[in-house]
Image (tube, rainbow, N blue to C red):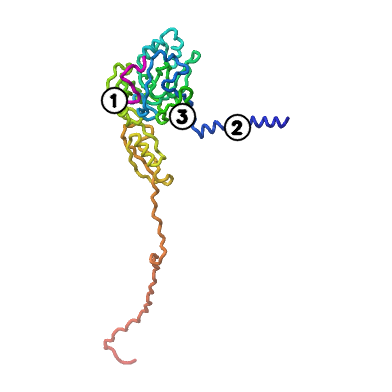
Amino acid sequence: MNDKRGITRIAVLLTVVLSIVVPTVTGCGMVAKVAVKAVARGAPAAAPFFVEALGIAADHAIGDGLALGGGVQKGNQPGLYGGTRNGKSCDKAKLAGFLKNPANRNKARQWAEAQGIDVDEIGGFIEKLTPVLLRNDTLVKNHDYKKGKAVAFDALLEAGIAVLVDVYGKPVVQCSCGNPLGAFEHDVDKADVEFKGTNKKWTSYDHDKVVKVEPPDDGNEVEAYRLVDVQEPDSGLERPVGSDGGQDTSLPEDPGEAGAEDNGEGNDGYVEVPDVTQSSVEEASRILEDQGLAVETVQEPSETAEPGTVLGQSLAAGEEVPASSTVTLMVATAPVPTDPQVTPTSDEFATPTPVEVATPEVTPSAPEPPPSDGLFGGTS
């Protein structure tokens, strides 16, 4: 009996220890991943807000060569989204009509709550939205409609899916199923994408081209979207905010090329300065030049850093600066040696010993007798 109790106590103790140790290892030694559900273009939604038979949206195949670089993109980035001249990619009128139908009142409440608006504001909200096509696989917070509730889940939407974006360029509706979309609340590199069921891994999937969209840094609303024409990739379309595509004007060139110098990290010709301190000067130069920045270097002696290591940079990491700005790197060099003190070792450098010079003794001579003048004579 005592043995069984002892075994039980040991098992309980091990369980407690593991419950303490495992989270610590995950928190300190590993990057926590976030489960993300892949949503393939054309795949039926598991629990949509409305059935796709309503024909509200038309997705479009996007070649992987049309995509920008990955990471965080700003909503007003030229070429971030695509469009087509033929037909509507998302019918806003049908969407609004569906949500205003009294028979769908509960869905409308849940839809509005996910958007952070009141149900009576749905019509005005949809009116300001703009239909576009995703050009990158895009991270969002998606919502299914299950048991009368909007159920949120992190998702990766495949490029080519039609979405409605708000006045800041953020995707807010997946058109094919009407699901409301929100912002992906994690770093891009934490996304652990799961491809399951009908959402099989698409051939163009590239982890390095996955993006999430944030509002412009200046906080201003977008006036018009500069879209890539997905049917004629060498040209573009300018689409006023809130329009359905009927007011598009042609652009003479691909706006994605015009915005390529931003490398997906800035807007209107601005880029974000990366942190390259503690990198080798070669790696730091490559990273900065890939961002469209110029590089200069100055040397700085260091007794602690390996020669060639970047000790500092003139532009702060995270700062938004115009493309082609110059970043000066302080690069470590070996410390300057000091001149060693020379200790004389040969006689030629020795201080000469003073020589004593003998002074001859001088003996005083007796005074000479006064000379005789011959005036006196005689003997005593």
The mark total stands at 3
Residue labelled with disc 3: 190
| Mark 1 neighbour density, 10 Å: few (under 14) some (14–19) many (20 or more) | some
Quadrant of the snapshot with the N terminus: top right
Residue labelled with disc 1: 235
Evaluate if marks 1 and 3 touch, with contact meaning CB atoms under 8 Å apart. no
Q: Nearer the viewer, mark 2 or mark 3?
A: 3
* Distance in Å between CA atoms under marks 2 and 1: 62 Å
Q: Farthest residue in the bottom direction?
A: 379
- Residue 115 in view here: no
Quadrant of the snapshot with the C terminus: bottom left
| Mark 3 neighbour density, 10 Å: few (under 14) some (14–19) many (20 or more) | few
Q: Earlier in the sequence, mark 2 or mark 3?
A: 2
**Amino acid on which the number 2 mark rests in the picture:** Val
| Mark 2 neighbour density, 10 Å: few (under 14) some (14–19) many (20 or more) | few
- Give the residues in magenta: 78-91
Q: Quadrant of residue 257?
A: top left
**Amino acid on which the number 3 mark rests in the picture:** Lys
Is residue 34 left or right of 253 when viewed as pictured?
Answer: right
Is residue 321 left or right of 157 when viewed as pictured?
Answer: left
Q: Earlier in the sequence, mark 2 or mark 1?
A: 2
Residue labelled with disc 2: 17
